[in-house]
Amino acid sequence: MKLIIAIVSNEDCSLLMKTLIKHKYFVTKLSSSGGFLKKGNATLMIGAKTEDIEEIIKIISDYSKTRKEMVPTSIINEFGAMPSIPFEVTVGGATLFIVDVEKFIKL
């Protein structure tokens, strides 16, 4: 038994969860936010059999796309915060952690 912890964009989460559930995988969503851009993310916990891992990774990959966004910046000096030139960053995609589950008990 494995536990997949997938951190995905809020924009991708709804359709991704629907697809995982349609394929009969159990999914729990936790709301989270990133430290760098301070944007909302979703952390999905997916319980899976070892033989299902590759299919789940494929589904997550298909529904978690990267995209470019412009991010405003600020320069902080002795006069306070001053707006600066925004820069482009890549957001989205997914970060996965796959953990062995030694014991699974459903109460």
Image: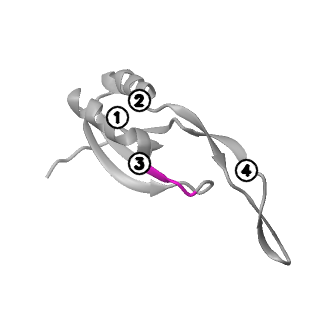
**Residue 68 appears in the rendering:** yes
Q: Quadrant of residue 21?
A: top left
Instruction: Give the CA distance from mark 3 to mark 1.
Output: 12 Å
Q: Earlier in the sequence, mark 2 or mark 3?
A: 3
Q: Position of residue 36 (x, y in %)?
A: 63, 54
Q: Residue 68: give x, y in percent of width and height.
A: 61, 37
Q: Are marks 2 and 1 in contact (CB under 8 Å)?
A: yes
Please report the residue visible at 32 percent of the width from the left and 49 percent of the height from the top: 29
- Which residue bears the numbered disc 4? 86
Within-10-Å neighbours for mark 2: few <14, some 14–19, many 20+? some
Circle 4 sits in a helix, a strand or a loop, which is it? loop
Q: Nearer the viewer, residue 72 or 40?
A: 72
Q: Are marks 3 and 1 in contact (CB under 8 Å)?
A: no
Q: Which residues are magenta?
A: 38-42
Q: Which mark is residue 63?
A: 2
Q: Amino acid at mark 1?
A: Leu
Return the residue at label 3: 43
Picture quadrant of residue 90: top right
User: What distance separates the C-alpha of mark 2 from that of mark 3?
Assistant: 14 Å
Residue pictured at 20% horizontal, 47% vertical: 105
Tell me whether the residue at label 4 lies in contact with that at label 2, contact meaning CB atoms closer than 8 angstroms: no
Question: Looking at the image, is mark 4 or mark 2 earlier in the sequence?
Answer: 2
Type of amino acid under label 4: Pro
Amino acid on which disc 3 is placed: Thr
**Which of the two residues, 45 or 81, is positioned nearer the viewer here?**
81
- Disc 1 marks which residue? 16
Q: Nearer the viewer, mark 4 or mark 3?
A: 4
Q: Quadrant of residue 82?
A: bottom right
